[in-house]
Amino acid sequence: MDPGTGILDATRPLGVYVHFPFCRARCPYCDFATAVRDPIPHEEYTAAVTAELAARADWFRGTSAPDLKSIYFGGGTPGLWRPAAIGRLIETTRRLFDATGPLEITVEANPGELTAEAAAGLRAAGVNRLSLGMQAFQDHLLHSIGRQHNVAAIAAAVDAVRTAGVDNLCADLMFGLPGQTMDDWRHSLVALVALSPEHVTAYALTVERGTPFGALERAGKLQRPDDEAVAAMCVTTHEVLQGADFEHYEISSYARPGRRAVHNTLYWTGGAYLGVGASSSSFRPLRDGTGWRFSNPRALATYLRSAAAHGGNPRPAKIERRTAGDLENEGLWLGLRTSDGVDRAAHVRRYGCDPLSSPARAAAAHKCVDAGWLSIAPDRLRLTVTGFLFADEVSSRLWLGD
């Protein structure tokens, strides 16, 4: 299968995701494609990603330049990437997609590693949004999850961001951590609000099987809050952040007015995205209602070898041709993650059917309404606040098989 075939649906906005796999240490809960290298091979990796961008741009251009909305540098710890390299990639992306207007350009970074000099360099390179992995405001919890910073480093990093002139700051927090209490969590939320970020991503710890935390949990040595306590932390997050004038616009996402994440919103609304770098994923929607999903090799060495052997265009490690039915299911699932929910008229325009046109799905949806999880209106389907806690259950009930 060749994900470059088929006519692109050029009406979809585009985001570019750039994966930087390098970290100074690997957190025991992390299942991402990361690599601890000293020194980091900045030039080799930058050259490979730049070549991949050039090789795959035609797949996402169609007959004209797409509406490029965002560039997102994730990882790993892209805050460790040399700002000059990030600047080169921003310039290359703009040139390839004829993007001269404003874009949301995000870089993930860690407190304790983001210096004032680095923040200023990123801003000079064109970065206008920084996402800081704060995770907790208790030193003992940061230590327990393997983070390399302490609480004091958080305020210092925020100061560096603001001094550099970046006025769009996203803060990541985690709940359900080993040894974490509700008082810990509430204190972290209050401390975070005092730092005045524009965006907050708050999510529960997920223990993946292949991680050190996964091994500890199987051995009965990882003492985490139970499901009821985690659900209570989720509810508290909603209450505290909404009380501080944040909009709860997606299950794990809160924003000041006008500061929703542009890049992530592309994922939730069926936008196109080109992922470059080791392990990155892409979605290429086609005019016939189908689409390609594909991802690069996860291992850094495999990615670099494949990119070098194929003119900068690494052979995808996984390719899926998604049917129109697959994408309709996904559109419903992703739309329900957001507070906007699923616009029924827009769903008809994109997928050719009302989301409740199937009798089986309509019956399942009304059962979700009876459970207090879902709201059905003539124009829109939305999860309730309680429904956010059961989003996966709702989606599984509404998913239509072949």
Image (cartoon, rainbow, N blue to C red):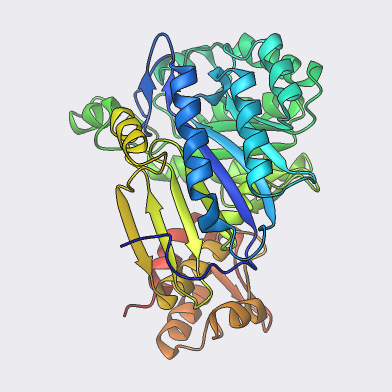
Q: Is residue 154 above or below residue 106?
A: above
Which residue is found at the position 38% from the left and 27% from the top?
Answer: 34
Query: Where the C terminus falls, by quadrant?
Result: bottom left
Res. 253 image quadrant:
top right
The location of residue 353, given as percent across then percent down, is 54, 86
Q: Is residue 392 above or below residue 48?
A: below
The location of residue 180, given as percent across then percent down, is 46, 26
**Observer-nearest of 191 and 336:** 336
The location of residue 244, given as percent across then percent down, is 77, 39
Q: How many marks?
A: 0
The location of residue 326, given as percent across then percent down, is 40, 72
**Observer-nearest of 181 and 252:** 252
Tell me if I can see residue 277 in this picture.
Answer: yes
Q: Is residue 119 above or below residue 277?
A: above
Judged left or right of residue 177, residue 248 is right
**Observer-nearest of 97 and 351:** 97
Res. 240 image quadrant:
top right
Outermost left residue = 219
Judged left or right of residue 37, residue 346 is right
Query: Where the N terminus falls, by quadrant?
Result: bottom left
Q: Is residue 143 above or below residue 10?
A: above
Which residue is found at the position 80% from the left and 48% from the top?
Answer: 258
Tell me if I can see residue 180 in this picture.
Answer: no
Which residue is found at the position 33% from the left and 57% from the top?
Answer: 319
Which residue is found at the position 36% from the left and 22% from the top?
Answer: 35
